[in-house]
Image (cartoon, rainbow, N blue to C red):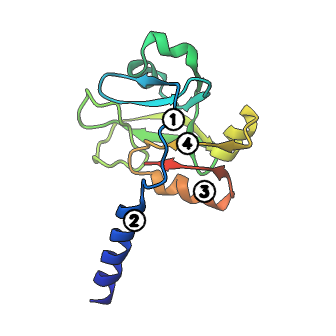
Amino acid sequence: VLMNVLRKLAKSAWVSRAQQDVVPLKDTVYLGSTYHGYYVPKEGKVFTADNKKEGYVYKISAKELGAITYCATGVWNEKKTVKFYVPANSNYAGHSITNLQNTEDYIEAPVDKLANIMRELGHQQIDLLKIEIEGSEYTVIDDVLADKLDVKMILV
């Protein structure tokens, strides 16, 4: 009973104050497809880390390629090569380290810690980290926290 009361209080506090001080950005540009994308500041720098370049190219228009720096490494909690299991639906690009769909086929691809990728790119901080890693988000978030990285906002 106590947990339900605490959950309700936490949720009401979060919902009512979540965007109260948010000010819309001016001079933004839309990056992404018709179905999925983000508005980012015109002067902003966008980097994508994805070990499957075909997924990256598919989701980004040719016009937007010049505004984005591509890193051919997936984000994980250590530097190594891992198995990414193929999704059951062949039209779906979401390969998974955790084998969410219990498939047998996989590809092997390189991954690395976000701290290492940031160091290679010369980044001291990240303003917005968008994570789409098919069931392995918490592994990466735990690693970001353990490494005490300066990440302002995380979207999962």
Numbered circles on residues, count: 4
Q: Name the residue under label 4.
A: 128
Q: Name the residue under label 2.
A: 14
Q: Quadrant of residue 9?
A: bottom left
Q: Which residue lies furthest to the bottom in this view?
A: 1
Label 3 sits on what residue type?
Asp
User: Marks 2 and 3: which is nearer the front?
Assistant: 2
Q: Mark 1 points at which residue?
A: 25
Label 2 sits on what residue type?
Trp
Query: Where's the N terminus, which quadrant?
Result: bottom left
**What secondary structure is found at the residue carrying circle 1?**
loop
Q: Mark 3 points at which residue?
A: 143
Rounded to the nearest angstrom, the CA distance separating label 4 from label 1 is 14 Å
Q: Which of marks 2 and 3 is nearer the N terminus?
A: 2
| Residue 98 on image: x %, y % | 40, 50
* 8 vs 131: above or below: below
Q: Which residue is drawn at 60% across and 50% down?
A: 152
Rounded to the nearest angstrom, the CA distance separating label 1 from label 3 is 30 Å
User: Marks 4 and 3: which is nearer the front?
Assistant: 4
**What secondary structure is found at the residue carrying circle 2?**
helix
Rounded to the nearest angstrom, the CA distance separating label 4 from label 2 is 20 Å
| Residue 106 on image: x %, y % | 39, 36
Residues at discs 4 and 1 in contact (Cβ within 8 Å) = no
**What secondary structure is found at the residue carrying circle 4?**
loop
Q: How crowded is mark 1: few (under 14 residues within 10 Å), some or many (20 or more)?
A: few
**What secondary structure is found at the residue carrying circle 3?**
helix
Residue placed most toward the observer, 93 or 11: 11
Rounded to the nearest angstrom, the CA distance separating label 1 from label 2 is 22 Å
Q: Which of marks 1 and 2 is nearer the N terminus?
A: 2
Residues at discs 1 and 2 in contact (Cβ within 8 Å) = no
Q: Residues within 10 Å of mark 2 (few under 14, many from 20)?
A: few
